[in-house]
Amino acid sequence: KAGVTQTPRYLIKTRGQQVTLSCSPISGHRSVSWYQQTPGQGLQFLFEYFSETQRNKGNFPGRFSGRQFSNSRSEMNVSTLELGDSALYLCASSGGTASSYNSPLHFGNGTRLTVT
Amino acid sequence: QKEVEQDPGPLSVPEGAIVSLNCTYSNSAFQYFMWYRQYSRKGPELLMYTYSSGNKEDGRFTAQVDKSSKYISLFIRDSQPSDSATYLCAMRAGNMLTFGGGTRLMVKP
């Protein structure tokens, strides 16, 4: 079974630009979560989608948004980039159901975003 | 105080040693416990997934959960240089998943 695939692997953007990151979950997984990872803050939860609906949201500003398509693929968008948005953005999928959270997350290798 | 505490290390051990990695937590509602391994420039890889208290073994890895003490451990037997990575614990209560900050492990040949 193919794992979680994230594209692109690396991105360099300038302040004020916007960026879109893509994630393809493991086949059959309907839950997709996004995390930001930095050396100082560790893994911070952005949001989770299940069957095209945002199910949970972390404590990030509205510049961070996402969506999920009918095939479970997900995209994350960051608008008006700031230097502090430089991080590894990780996508994870899980095989949980609509009413449960008892399946573990499986992560992709992330997109390394550098904002200059 | 963080909900999940994990010593950042680095922890340096010789090849073949038994490694003990630990996390403590404060939220008694945590029910599912996970350990992830993360190599540099890679995403976290799921190593162990356990529910409630007890031990679970998978090859050289043993996960231990002590809910009464709010303490979880990951033991690595016969450690190898390829085990050098950052190890993250994670715990779930309902829709809330909380990660530790990670422990960096270095296994020296």
Image (cartoon, rainbow, N blue to C red):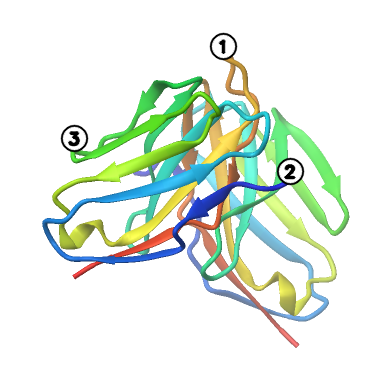
Residue B12: horizontal and vertical position, in percent?
A: 62, 78
Residue drawn at x 33%, y 55% is A41
Which quadrant of the rendered structure holds the N terminus of chain A? Answer: top right
Which residue corresponds to mark 1? A99
Residue A35: horizontal and vertical position, in percent?
A: 41, 45
Mark 3 belongs to chain: A
Q: In this image, B54 relative to A98: left or right?
A: right
Q: Earlier in the sequence, mark 1 or mark 3?
A: 3
Q: Residues within 10 Å of mark 2 (few under 14, many from 20)?
A: many
Q: In this image, B53 relative to A41: left or right?
A: right
**Disc 1 from disc 2: Cα separation:** 27 Å
| SS at circle 2 | strand
Task: Tell me the amino acid under the disc marked 3.
Answer: Gly
Mark 2 belongs to chain: B
The numbered mark at residue A62 is 3
* Circles 1 and 3 on the same subunit: yes
Which residue corresponds to mark 2? B64
Residue drawn at x 68%, y 36% is B66
Task: Tell me the amino acid under the disc marked 1.
Answer: Ser
| SS at circle 1 | loop
Residue drawn at x 59%, y 16% is A100
* Circles 2 and 3 on the same subunit: no
**Disc 2 from disc 3: Cα separation:** 39 Å
Which residue is most to the front? A70
Q: In this image, B4 relative to B14: left or right?
A: left
